Amino acid sequence: MALCGLALAASAGGAWAAPATPPPAQLADMLARAAPGADRKVLRLAATAMTCALRRPELGIDPTRLSVIDYSRPSTEQRMWVFDLARQKLLFEEWVAHGRNSGGNQTEHFSNRDGSFMSSLGAFTARETYMGGNGYSLRLEGLEPGFNDHARDRAIVIHGAPYVNPTMARLQGRLGRSLGCPAVRLSVARPLIDSLRGGTLVFAYYPDKDWLARSQLLGPNCGGSVG
């Protein structure tokens, strides 16, 4: 059986049981081993949010997958990770764009408002895919009232974009920017999106004091009304 009880276990009758969810500290340790380049503090918060969200079955969170975006890092660095929790494996470590009004190379401003062209903070659920103006795309549903719960109405989605180009970023000092979407490289967009679709928790971090204090998926706030 995999560490932390994340592997699927067969019941006595031969049916597959749902994977158990480890305590946040154990989950965070596993994430850190899989992605040693990520900030352990951010991974601990993501693990806390994941554990809290799984207590709300109506949210439809897939317990075997997790994605973390660390907007405290500059856009020139890899700052998005996708984990296969059941296999304790890192699937992707990627560059991701932020909204054009959220900052230059550093992400500094966030919004839940339509037309702001800013990124949003907090936990999302990755839902369905579709073909749109940016090609193959993945809808995100915000789980944080006041911070990202307008994501679907704002069409905040994960999609590929030619401006997410690490080579050009080194030359111009930053990645290109989106209208608020966490855009990724075109070459990885489809497999990355397919790894997230259908219920993955996507945790977008920044050390925003208001969000950290009020999030209903972190710390003592766990169990509050979501959505």
Image: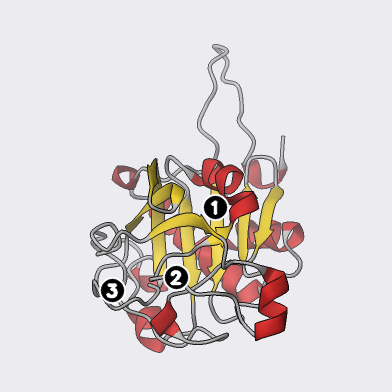
Which mark, residue 66? Answer: 1
Q: Amino acid at mark 1?
A: Leu
Horizontal side of 145 relative to 39 (left or right) equals: left
According to the image, label 2 marks what residue?
178
10 Å neighbourhood of mark 3: few (<14), some, or many (≥20)? many
Q: What's the CA distance linking mark 3 and mark 2?
A: 15 Å
Question: Is residue 158 or residue 9 the one in the foreground?
Answer: 158
Q: Residue at x 72, y 80 (%)?
A: 170
Is 48 placed above or below 8 here? below
Q: What's the CA distance linking mark 3 and mark 1?
A: 22 Å
Task: Mark yes or no: residue 20 visible.
Answer: yes
Image quarter hosting the C terminus: bottom left
- Residue 188 image point, x, y percent: 63, 50
Q: Residue at x 45, y 48 (%)?
A: 135
Q: Residue at x 32, y 78 (%)?
A: 111
Give the tally of numbered discs. Answer: 3
Horizontal side of 15 relative to 174 (left or right) equals: left
- Which quadrant holds residue 19? top right
Which mark, residue 112? Answer: 3
